Image: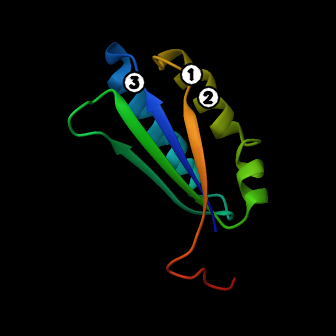
Amino acid sequence: MHIVQVHIIVKSEFIDSFKNATLENARNSLQEPGIARFDVFQQADDLTRFELVEVYRTSGDAVKHKETSHYNKWREIAEPMMAEPRTRTVYNNIFPADKAH
């Protein structure tokens, strides 16, 4: 698996709009065959901070995701709502072991 953790800080006036746009993107992303999980988290003690945990079957599936219309729609809507550019960290799965597809 190829895991991407995206760290996002949103301007406080856009929290609800950001959540709505991000949930739409997440729901559509789960329809992609290359995505195993797409989790959206909001920090409990700072509601402007979000984490997206995107679990792809391969690194190529992450590239394909960025070519989808729902991702590009989200990016266009969400980026102006961010207090600063988002950052990301990429991980390789260790445990539990990836299941054969």
Q: Is residue 80 above or below residue 78?
A: above
Q: Residue furthest left?
A: 45
Give the camera-side residue of 36 and 50: 50
Of marks 3 and 2, which one's residue comes earlier in the chain? 3
Q: Secondary structure at mark 2?
A: helix
Quadrant of the snapshot with the C terminus = bottom right
Label 2 sits on residue: 75
Label 3 sits on residue: 17
In this image, 100 relative to 24: left or right?
Answer: right
Tell me the number on the disc at residue 67.
Answer: none
Label 1 sits on residue: 79
Of marks 1 and 3, which one's residue comes earlier in the chain? 3
Q: Nearer the viewer, mark 1 or mark 3?
A: 1
What residue is drawn where x is 63% and y is 30%?
73
What residue is drawn where x is 55% and y is 29%?
86
Q: Is residue 79 above or below residue 31?
A: above
Quadrant of the snapshot with the N terminus = bottom right
Q: Residue furthest bottom?
A: 100
Q: Secondary structure at mark 1?
A: helix
Residue 32 place in picture, x, y as percent? 66, 58
- Tell me whether the residue at label 1 lies in contact with that at label 3, contact meaning CB atoms closer than 8 angstroms: no
- Tell me whether the residue at label 2 lies in contact with that at label 1, contact meaning CB atoms closer than 8 angstroms: yes
What residue is drawn where x is 45% and y is 16%?
83
- Separation (CA) of disc 3 from disc 2: 13 Å
Residue 42 place in picture, x, y as percent? 32, 40
